[in-house]
Image (cartoon, rainbow, N blue to C red):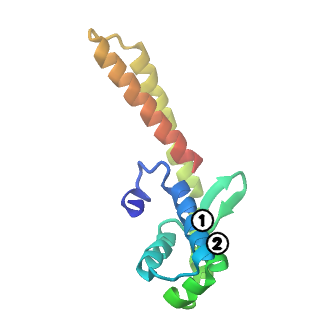
């Protein structure tokens, strides 16, 4: 379920759930010290290619690979080996630096488009009250998705 919508445009809480999943796995491993499911750990580790870093708040970011390497080092060594994740993280940050201006322009255009659509949806008077409510709900939902996407 975690991989099905992660990285999708309609993704809402998958990144926050991934933090919880990593923390829960580290807690389980700390309690029981049983490396019983290497396949699950490998699948969880591979998610770092989709989610290399998660923005928490302000200037605070969380790297899942750093967390797992520190908290469940035994599983990382036995399942993954000696991963070279620094290079991947640096490439990801460098790519984000290159695309930041185009992303800002894209979001600016999307927000302006949404504002125009919202304004016309609020001023249009359709004969059916149901149509008006459906349109407004759809516009509010798209605005919420857009705001969440910008926040991430």
- Kindly identify which residue carries mark 1: 23
Quadrant for the N terminus in the image:
bottom left
In contact (CB < 8 Å): disc 1 and disc 2 = yes
Identify which residue is drawn at 39% across, 56% down: 5
| Res 110 visible | no
Toward which corner of the image does residue 27 lie, by quadrant? bottom right
Q: Position of residue 130 (x, y in %)?
A: 29, 16
Looking at the picture, does residue 53 appear above or below residue 38? Answer: above
Mark positioned earlier in the residue sequence (1 or 2): 1
Q: Residue at x 27, y 8 (%)?
A: 127
In the drawing, what numbered circle is on residue 67? Answer: 2
Q: Would residue 96 be found to the left or right of residue 120 on screen?
A: right
Viewer-closest of 116 and 87: 87
Using a 10 Å C-alpha cutoff, classify the residue at mark 2 as few (fewer than 14 neighbours), some (14 to 19) or many (20 or more): some
How many C-alpha atoms fall within 10 Å of the one at disc 1: few (<14), some, or many (≥20)? some
The reply to whether residue 10 is in sight is yes
Residue at image point 49% right, 41% down: 146
Find residue 73 and report its image quarter: bottom right
Please tell me which residue lies in front, 98 or 2. 2
Camera-side mark, 1 or 2: 1
29 to 137, vertically: above or below:
below
Residue 123 vertical position relative to residue 79 in the rendered view, above or below: above
Q: How many marks?
A: 2
Q: Helix, strand, or loop for circle 2?
A: helix
Quadrant location of residue 7? bottom left
Residue 19: where, in percent of width, then height? 57, 61
């Amino acid at each position: 379920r975690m991989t099905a919508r992660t990285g999708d445009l309609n993704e809402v809480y998958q990144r926050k759930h991934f933090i919880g999943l990593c923390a829960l796995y580290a807690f389980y491993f700390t309690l029981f010290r049983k490396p019983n499911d290497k396949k699950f750990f490998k699948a969880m580790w591979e998610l770092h290619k989709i989610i290399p870093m998660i923005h928490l708040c302000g200037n605070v970011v969380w790297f899942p690979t750093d967390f797992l390497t520190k908290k469940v080092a035994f599983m990382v060594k036995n399942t993954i080996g000696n991963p070279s994740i620094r290079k991947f993280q640096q490439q990801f940050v460098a790519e984000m630096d290159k695309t930041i201006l185009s992303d800002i322009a894209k979001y600016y255009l999307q927000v302006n488009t949404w504002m125009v659509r919202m304004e016309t949806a609020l001023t249009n008077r359709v004969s059916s009250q149901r149509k008006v409510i459906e349109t407004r709900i759809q516009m509010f939902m798209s605005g919420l998705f857009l705001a969440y996407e910008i926040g991430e």
